[in-house]
């Protein structure tokens, strides 16, 4: 139970950081929209807008890495992995984390720290324009993002160890919404009878549960998810 609390606590930290920095996409949308208006309507382009876009999107991309790892959302070449037993999956994941993940993220943190440190020392500014904005605060995001990913990676390694011992993946913190797209679409159709509607909802549920079992590692349990067919 203590291990489960620690793992879910790390999941919450990664989810909090991801959701916080996800708001940068809203700021980025306003920045881009405002620049389009200034450039093509007012004929007054902003010289530093390219750098601002890069820093906003780069920060969003890096700081949401731990969140994506917590949700098991990183790209995986799932050709055989999904058909493996949980212990085999955990052994494979553990080997890959040790061989590639830990060295790669440690290198990212080490290099990122030196990049950021040097950038602060020389008061580095962008050289895209003659009077570019400072970039040292952007480079400081690199080691911070690496640290968050490493913390979440340690939690994932612990999950592998637990799965190797118990034969089941421990639960992870989910971030899902009610799945009612299939039911809502079918309810508006005049050409689908009740039996066909129920069959389609059941099939959607089976597909979702199979995806959760393979991707989320929750020992076959689906939590906080409901379908229209489940409502009473």
Image (spheres, rainbow, N blue to C red):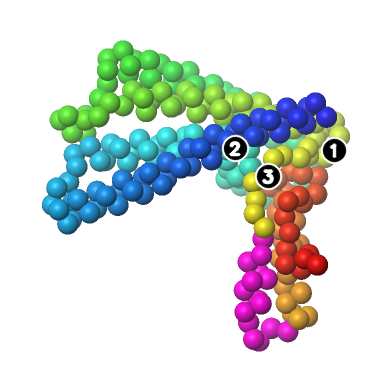
Q: Can residue 94 be seen in this snapshot? A: no
Measured as percent of width and height from the top left, residue 192 is found at: 69, 83
Left or right for 56, reference 205: left
Question: Which residue is pictured at 80% across the width and 49% down the height?
Answer: 221
Between marks 1 and 3, how big is the CA–CA gap? 21 Å
Query: Outermost residue toward the front?
Result: 232
Q: Which residue is mark 2?
A: 15
Q: Secondary structure at mark 3?
A: loop
Residue 94 at x, y = what percent?
70, 31
- Residue at position x 62%, y 74% from top? 185
Residue ranking furthest to the top? 121
Q: In whole angstroms, how far apart are the C-alphas of marks 2 and 1?
A: 26 Å
Label 2's element?
A: helix
Q: Quadrant of residue 168?
A: top right
Residue 167 is tagged as 1
Labels 2 and 3: the sequence-earlier one? 2
- Can residue 130 be found in the magenta stretch? no
In percent of the image, x 56 and y 27: which residue is there?
A: 148
Whether residue 130 sits left or right of residue 24 in the image: it is: left
Q: Is residue 215 left or right of residue 60?
A: right
The quarter of the displayed image where residue 91 is located: top right
| Segment tinted magenta in the rendering | 179-193
Q: Residues within 10 Å of mark 2 (few under 14, many from 20)?
A: many
Q: Residue at x 80, y 26 (%)?
A: 2
Q: Which residue is mark 3?
A: 174
21 displayed left or right of 120? right
Residue 185 in magenta? yes
- Mark 1 or mark 3: whose residue is earlier in sequence: 1
Depth check, front residue: 113 or 186: 186
Question: Distance of mark 2 from mark 3, alpha carbons?
Answer: 9 Å
Where residue 38 sits in the image (x, y, percent)?
Answer: 19, 50
């Amino acid at each position: 139970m203590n291990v489960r609390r620690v793992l879910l606590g790390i999941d919450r930290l990664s989810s909090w950081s991801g959701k916080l920095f996800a708001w940068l996409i809203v700021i980025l949308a306003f920045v881009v929209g405002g620049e389009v208006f200034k450039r093509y309507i007012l004929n007054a382009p902003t010289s530093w807008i390219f750098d601002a876009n890069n820093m906003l999107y780069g920060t969003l991309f890096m700081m949401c890495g731990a969140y994506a790892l917590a949700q098991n959302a990183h790209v995986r070449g799932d050709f055989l992995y999904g058909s493996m037993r949980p212990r085999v999956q955990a052994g494979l994941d553990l080997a890959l984390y040790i061989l590639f993940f830990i060295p790669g993220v440690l290198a990212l943190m080490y290099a990122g720290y030196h990049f950021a440190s040097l950038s602060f020392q020389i008061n580095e500014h962008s050289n895209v324009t003659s009077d570019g904005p400072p970039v040292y605060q952007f480079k400081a995001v690199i080691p911070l993002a690496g640290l968050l990913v490493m913390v979440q990676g340690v939690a994932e390694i612990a999950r592998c160890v637990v799965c190797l011992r118990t034969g089941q993946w421990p639960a992870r913190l989910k971030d899902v919404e009610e799945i009612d797209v299939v039911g809502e679409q079918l309810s508006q159709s005049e050409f689908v009878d009740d039996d066909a509607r129920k069959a389609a909802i059941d099939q959607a549920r089976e597909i979702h549960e199979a995806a959760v079992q393979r991707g989320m590692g929750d020992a076959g349990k689906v939590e906080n998810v409901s379908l229209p067919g489940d409502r009473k």
